[in-house]
Image (cartoon, rainbow, N blue to C red):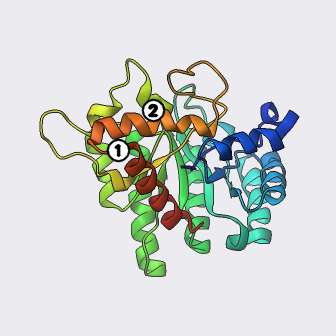
């Protein structure tokens, strides 16, 4: 299994990281991708990924909830680090996107920060880890525009993952048609989640191909059932894989091999 989104630089894991990562590996986790969310996390993400360079792989970005009036200064600082390490170390730009859930005070700033970081991804030929909450239409339109710009300016598509996807079948298929992937994590296992029926509609409508999915945790958050409410771990993705196996009518091994291949191809790890 490959965890395509895990905040392993969170202090909650710091006490005995060696032992923790060993337990993840023993639990079937081949690799973990670690996104940045702030200026400060550039250092924590890169430090932990350099320490475990054959197992942890970094991305850098400014999370939409961190966008404030001074976002241009924050972006400049993160871009400086991106310029230093470039695509020789980074596997993606992220975690970036839009989040209108708690406030729309900085809605315009979020959108411009998102567009700017998509331009970084184009420049460095890196995929994007996108966070979108209560902002479906704006996220999709901005990504479509950036996708077209990348084709025009660079002769290649802009690719990425919709992190923690929980949207509709129609939205999912819009991203799939662009060649984008959907990050599936613990939410799939929640009792009241309708994500499964969006991925695999029971009425025979077109669903999302398994090859368009990648596994993720968003750890330390969103632990799947039966660990819901606990600190999440990458090895808990097995419960997500088993749920997907049930939905798609394949083995858990097939889910793991398919999603791992998709992640390796997208992030070039």
Which image quadrant for residue 235? Answer: top right
Q: Crowding at label 1, few (<14), some or many (≥20) Cα neighbours within 10 Å? A: few
* Residue 243 in the figure: left or right of residue 83: left
Is label 2 in a helix, a strand or a loop? loop
- Residue 67 seen in the current view: no
User: Helix, strand or loop at disc 1?
Assistant: loop
Which disc, if any, is residue 152?
A: none
Tell me where residue 149 appears, x and y as whole percent: 44, 70
Determine the residue positioned at 46% across, 29% down. 187
Residue 200 visible to the viewer? yes
Q: Is residue 166 above or below residue 149?
A: above
Q: Which residue corresponds to mark 1?
A: 251
**Left or right of 98 on screen, residue 209:** left
Circle 2 residue: 134
Residue 1 locus on image (x, y percent): 54, 49
Q: Position of residue 82 (x, y in %)?
A: 74, 65
Residue at image position (38%, 33%) is 243
Could you say which is closer to the camera, residue 162 or residue 262?
A: 262
């Amino acid at each position: 299994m490959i965890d395509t989104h895990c905040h392993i630089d969170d202090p909650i894991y710091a006490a005995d990281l060696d032992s923790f990562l060993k337990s993840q590996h023993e639990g079937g986790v081949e690799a973990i991708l670690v996104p940045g969310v702030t200026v400060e996390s550039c250092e924590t993400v890169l430090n932990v990924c350099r320490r475990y360079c054959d197992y942890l792989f970094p991305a850098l970005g400014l999370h939409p909830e961190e966008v404030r009036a001074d976002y241009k200064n924050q972006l400049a600082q993160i871009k400086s680090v991106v310029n230093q390490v470039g695509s020789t170390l980074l596997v993606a730009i992220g975690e970036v996107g839009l989040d209108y859930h708690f406030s729309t005070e900085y809605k315009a700033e979020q959108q411009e920060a998102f567009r700017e970081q998509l331009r970084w991804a184009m420049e460095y030929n890196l995929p994007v880890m996108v966070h979108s909450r209560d902002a479906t239409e704006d996220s999709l339109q901005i990504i479509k525009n950036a996708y077209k710009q990348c084709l025009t300016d660079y002769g290649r598509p802009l690719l990425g993952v919709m992190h923690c996807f929980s949207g509709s079948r129609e939205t999912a298929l819009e991203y799939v048609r662009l060649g984008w992937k959907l990050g599936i994590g613990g939410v799939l296992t929640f009792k009241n989640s309708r994500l499964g029926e969006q991925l695999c509609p029971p009425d025979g409508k077109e669903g999302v191909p398994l090859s368009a999915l990648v596994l993720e945790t968003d750890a330390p958050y969103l632990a799947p059932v039966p660990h819901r409410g606990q600190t999440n771990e990458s090895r808990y993705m097995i419960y997500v894989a088993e749920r997907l196996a049930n939905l798609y009518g394949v083995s858990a091994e097939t889910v793991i091999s398919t999603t791992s291949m998709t992640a390796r191809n997208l992030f070039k790890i």
